Image (cartoon, rainbow, N blue to C red):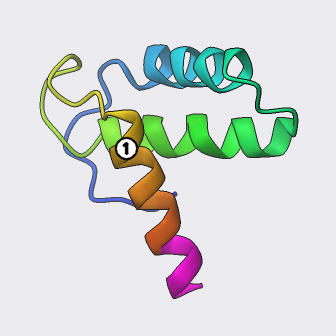
Amino acid sequence: FEVAVVDTTGAGDVYHGALALALSRGVDDMSEAIEFASAAAALTCTTFGGRNGIPTGEEVRTFLAKRKRAG
């Protein structure tokens, strides 16, 4: 995802955590789980500081919904 990058600290960790979360919550479509994880990692990069930038699940879902409406 194209975002205004401020800091990439923690993006990989957030990606892996979000992927694990999606799969543990029953997302059966791997591409959907990867999309969720990628969006979470991208959003993390928009805020300075790894921990400060971790998005909530709702923030990720809102981000994805806006992109789907726009695209």
Q: Which residue is mark 1?
A: 58
**Toward which corner of the image does residue 36 lie, by quadrant?**
top right
Q: Please determine whether, in this image, residue 62 is positioned above or below residue 24.
A: below
Q: Please determine whether, in this image, residue 69 is positioned above or below residue 57.
A: below
Side of 37 where 59 appears, left or right:
left
Front residue of 22/34: it is 22
Q: Please determine whether, in this image, residue 51 is positioned above or below residue 41.
A: above
- Residue numbers of the magenta segment: 67-71
Side of 69 where 29 appears, left or right:
right
> Is residue 52 part of the magenta span, yes or no?
no
Q: Name the residue at the front extreme.
A: 26
Residue beneath the point at 30% across and 34% down: 55
Residue beneath the point at 58% across and 75% down: 68
Front residue of 9/43: it is 43
Front residue of 28/41: it is 28
Front residue of 24/70: it is 24
Judge the density around disc 1: few (<14), some (14-19), many (≥20) Cα neighbours within 10 Å: few
Q: Amino acid at mark 1?
A: Glu
Magenta span dominant secondary structure:
helix
Residue beneath the point at 41% across and 26% down: 11
Q: How many marks?
A: 1
